[in-house]
Each structure stands twice: as C-alpha cells, then as structure tokens.
Amino acid sequence: MGKLFLYIAVSILVIWSMDAVNINQIFKKNRVYQARFFYFFLGISLIYLVTNFLLDLFTSIKIF
C-alpha cells in the first residue's frame, strides 16, 4: 500500500514539475505527436526512477 501511495504522490509531483518546462523549442515544427510521446515517456521514466530511488532510500533507513 505504501508503494502505491508513493507512486501516486511522485506522479503528481512529476506532472506538476514538468508543466513548468517549455519543451516546444527543442522539437522540430510539425512534430507534435513525437513531442507528445517523448514528453509522456520522459514523465513515466521520471516517475519510475524517483519512486524507486525513494523506496530504496526508505528501505535502507528502515522507514517502510
């Protein structure tokens, strides 16, 4: 149950923080779908990495 809560909390934080980044200048014009896929997979990757880092950190200091 703790892992699910952590995934939800990190998902909210990652989506909120990625909203502040303007990635439109990075991509070529008329590549909207590719930019969306990149943004989606970047978000999923960040959620996975941050959650696993926090889980490892919490288990090493015996919180969960």
Image: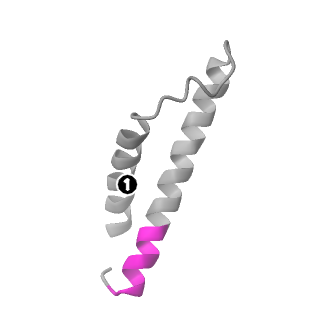
Residue 58 among magenta residues:
yes
> Which residue sits at x=47%, y=69%?
53
Q: Which residues are magenta?
A: 53-62
Whole-percent x, y for residue 45 in the image: 56, 51
Whole-percent x, y for residue 31 in the image: 68, 18
In the picture shown, does residue 35 fall above or below 1?
above
> Which residue sits at x=30%, y=82%?
63
In the picture shown, does residue 64 fall above or below 46?
below
> Which residue sits at x=40%, y=34%?
19
* Image quarter of the C terminus: bottom left
Is disc 1 surrounded by few (<14), some (14 to 19) or many (20+) residues within 10 Å? some
Disc 1 target residue: 10
Is residue 9 visible in the rendered structure shown here? yes
**Callout 1: SS:** helix
Whole-percent x, y for residue 4 in the image: 37, 60
* Image quarter of the N terminus: bottom left
Number of residue marks: 1
> Which residue sits at x=57%, y=43%?
42
